[in-house]
Amino acid sequence: MDMGNQHASITALQEIQRKVKDLEQSVATFSGLQSDPEYKKLEKALTKQLFEIESIDTEGKANISQARKRAIEEVERLIKELEQNANHPCRLAIETIFKEAQCLVAQQIAPMYGGRRCITEEFEEGIQNILMRLTQVKTEGKASLRKARYRTLTKVLAIQEILENCLKQQVLALPLSTDAHPSIFKINSVLLEVNKARGSLIALLAGVNECETYRHLSCVLSGLIADLDALDVSGHVEVRNYRKEVVEEINNLLKYLDLEEEARFTSAYDLAKNQSIVKIESIRKRSTEIKACVLERGHNMYDIHVGTRSELQVLIAQLDEVSVEKNPCIREARRRAVVEVQTVISYLDLKEALERRQSVCNQANPEHPSHTTVWIVLGNLSDLQKEVLSFDGSRADKNYRRLEEELTKQLLALDAIDSQGDDRSKEARKQAVKFANNILSYLDMKTDEWEY
């Protein structure tokens, strides 16, 4: 097309569409709420473009009218997407959980403002529970939800790390009395300010300290380091080591001050591209291939048991080497992969044991009736485990309910077995109950729709 002959209204529309295109990525990855300044900024920018599009004169020309209509629809789509991101049920779930963290911090952090380290195990357990619930929030593969969960996890993880450090050393040892050296009093006073700063940092990460900012806290901590550096402790090894210990405390806090900006701009929230997740998925793929071969075989397990089991154990060892990067989502992904491999191993072990028992059954030395009954149940459990390993549905499926009911029946059958004092039968029954519960847990894990 000769651009010199293009209608001015079309040119204006194209210019507006370029501006809208620039806003599209920001809308797609918006991870906040409607109350956030960034939401209002994006909404205002899109609304402005919408008004400009609507103000373009079509001069009654059909092609211009159609172009303007398409441009309006695109902007309206982005405005709607922005609103949906901010009000998505999973996004609101993340906010609800984070508000619980805020309440917990607000209740527990007060002693730290006084310079004390009264961190309770209940506080730490509460934060751990919040972390676990955050990892269970669905993201549906949406960048906005992944980013929101990542940002929230980053803050709560930082709080957890700070609390863990406090529990490890509730009171920093004071190696020297103030009479030992003039600098000791100053170091002690700095340490008191560090403890206060720790409380401020936790409150800041939780969003319950409106009187503090990351920049100001950074300046305060840096100033404390400068005060310590100015002390003359030459020739006093113990005092110098004490000062060094307090400086390390301050540096440990400083590293958390960049988390907000990192979480806002980093692409680390997209765990599908995370190298640890990539490795986990590669191992899972191989595990799935092995599982398919095992399930297809169905009999004569002894022939493949040793080699296959060894390879599966290698996969578990490889999973153990995967770095979870202090990220509970990666940790959970690794745990699930390990459970998947271990379930295949347990299936192989039981299948081989059943086949071996059948081939070497010694009628001359009959076993206790209850022991025989346990093995009958184990045979049923092996068949059910094969179905569970093959199952690829949801909890709404009839087959899921059937498998759950059948496994429960086997547990009831085991409960009804009277070992009559036979220790061997009692131990076999105990192991069979554990095996049945593991299959049930695995079935639940496969169908809980968890995602990283």
Image (spheres, grey):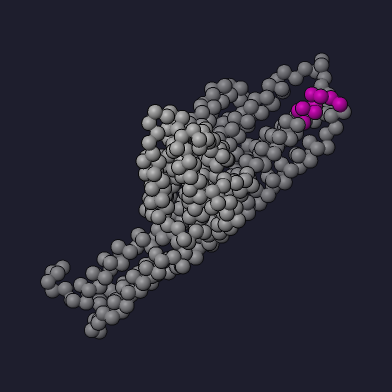
Residue located at (57% from left, 21% from top): 306
User: Residue extending furthest top?
Assistant: 364
User: Residue extending furthest right?
Assistant: 420
Give the image quarter of residue 236.
top left
**Residue 112, visible in the rendered structure:** yes
- What's the magenta region? 421-429
Estimate the x, y position of residue 252 in percent, counting from the top left.
45, 42
Q: Is residue 376 above or below residue 210?
A: above
Estimate the x, y position of residue 409 in percent, counting from the top left.
76, 42
Q: Is residue 92 above or below residue 197?
A: below
Q: Quadrant of the N terminus?
A: bottom left
Estimate the x, y position of residue 210 in percent, counting from the top left.
48, 61
Give the image quarter of residue 300.
top right
Estimate the x, y position of residue 414 in percent, counting from the top left.
79, 36
Residue located at (71% from left, 22% from top): 357
Residue located at (56% from left, 39% from top): 171
Of 282 and 166, nearer the camera is: 166
Q: Is residue 389 above or below residue 41?
A: above
Residue 286 in the figure: left or right of residue 25: right
Residue 232 in the figure: left or right of residue 206: left
